[in-house]
Each structure stands twice: as structure tokens, then as C-alpha cells.
């Protein structure tokens, strides 16, 4: 299991106070991801490690009340995304070096992938895309892996 960090809260508070609408910053960000058909999940600060068990959500995303409870804990948590069916068959190419990231961006463009999202990371980057059906994770080489069903990213 792995979690792809997609957003990091900049707050260092131990308590995440609600914003004007009654939701805190993380709950609001998680709701935004969910509105795009993605399954957000809380991860430890500065980490991809989920804060709680996630397997119950691998095929169906947390509902609104579950999501709000998961993100009510701490302002310094990261937000990860569950891959596979829970996020509309989300898959992620996880590149561990800048060279691998650049190479895979070219491959994705050349292959004519539909909508993709890309994010640079400290070591390389992540390329997010959806597939017609959930795909199994594949460890491709030392610099890149494909994350899919039964993983969080």
C-alpha cells in the first residue's frame, strides 16, 4: 500500500479549526477532490503513510460524513488519493527521479492519454490519469512504478 501525496497543508497547528462554512481547511480540500470523483485519504504529515486503515475504501470512496471525520483530526496532515475503483479507476505513474518524470511525460503525450494531472515531487514526480478499468500496480524499474487498484497514492 502506498499513498500519493497530492496536497500538503501548510498549517502547523495541532488543531484544525473550522473555516467559515463549518469545515476546516483539510475537509474543504478533501471535499474538492471528492467533487472530481477522487477518493481523498489522510496521510501522516510530510509522508505518504495513511493515518488509519484504508482497505475498506479501496472500491468505494469514503462518503461525506466519513471523509469529514477522517480529516477532522490535525491540520498538518497530508492528503493522499486512493487509486483504482474508489477514484474512478485512477492510476499514477510514480517517478523517482527528474529524468524518469520527463521521460514518462513524453510517453504519456506520445500515447495520447486523455486528461492527466502532473505534480513534481522532491525526487521526481507523479502523473495521474484514469483508465477504463482498474489496473494492477506494476514495479517497472528502479526509477518508476505504476500505482493502481488496492493502493493509495
Image (cartoon, rainbow, N blue to C red):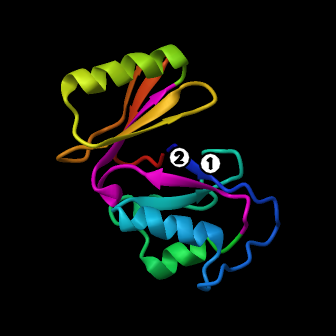
User: Measured from the top left, where is residue 44 in percent x and y?
Assistant: 68, 53
Q: Which residue is mark 2?
A: 3
Residue at image point 58% right, 51% down: 7
Instruction: Name above or below for residue 124 compared with residue 7.
Output: above
Query: Of 39 and 119, which appears nearest the observer?
Result: 119
Distance CA(mark 1)–CA(mark 2): 6 Å
- Badge count: 2
Instruction: Name above or below for residue 121 compared with residue 80.
Output: above
Query: Of 151 and 34, which appears nearest the observer?
Result: 34
9 within the magenta span:
no
Looking at the rendered structure, the secondary structure element under dot 2 is loop
Looking at the rendered structure, the secondary structure element under dot 1 is loop
Q: Which residue is mark 1?
A: 49
Q: 10 Å neighbourhood of mark 1: few (<14), some, or many (≥20)?
A: some
Query: Of 58 and 130, which appears nearest the observer?
Result: 130
Residue at image point 49% right, 82% down: 65
Query: Of 150 and 130, which appears nearest the observer?
Result: 130
Q: 10 Å neighbourhood of mark 2: few (<14), some, or many (≥20)?
A: many
User: Measured from the top left, where is residue 138 in percent x and y?
Assistant: 36, 29
Does residue 148 appear in the picture of this structure?
Answer: no
- Give the extent of the magenta segment: 74-95
Residue 12: image quadrant is bottom right
Residue at image point 64% right, 59% down: 51
Numbered circle sitting on residue 147? none
Residue 104: image quadrant is top left
Does residue 109 appear in the picture of this structure?
Answer: yes
N-terminal label among 1 and 2: 2
User: Measured from the top left, where is residue 84 in percent x and y?
Assistant: 33, 50
Amino acid at each position: 500500500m502506498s499513498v500519493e501525496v497530492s496536497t500538503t497543508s501548510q498549517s502547523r497547528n495541532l488543531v484544525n479549526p473550522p473555516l467559515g462554512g463549518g469545515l476546516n481547511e483539510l475537509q474543504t480540500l478533501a471535499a474538492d477532490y471528492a467533487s472530481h470523483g477522487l477518493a481523498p485519504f489522510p496521510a501522516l504529515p510530510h509522508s505518504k503513510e495513511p493515518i488509519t486503515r484504508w482497505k475498506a475504501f479501496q472500491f468505494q470512496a469514503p462518503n461525506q460524513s466519513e471523509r469529514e471525520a477522517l480529516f477532522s483530526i490535525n491540520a498538518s496532515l497530508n492528503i493522499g488519493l486512493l487509486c483504482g475503483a474508489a477514484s474512478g479507476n485512477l492510476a499514477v505513474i510514480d517517478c523517482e527521479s527528474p529524468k524518469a518524470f520527463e521521460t514518462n511525460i513524453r510517453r504519456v503525450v506520445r500515447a495520447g492519454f486523455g486528461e492527466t494531472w502532473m505534480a513534481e515531487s522532491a525526487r521526481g514526480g507523479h502523473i495521474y490519469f484514469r483508465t477504463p478499468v482498474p489496473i494492477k500496480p506494476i514495479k517497472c524499474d528502479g526509477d518508476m512504478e505504476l500505482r493502481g487498484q488496492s493502493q493509495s497514492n
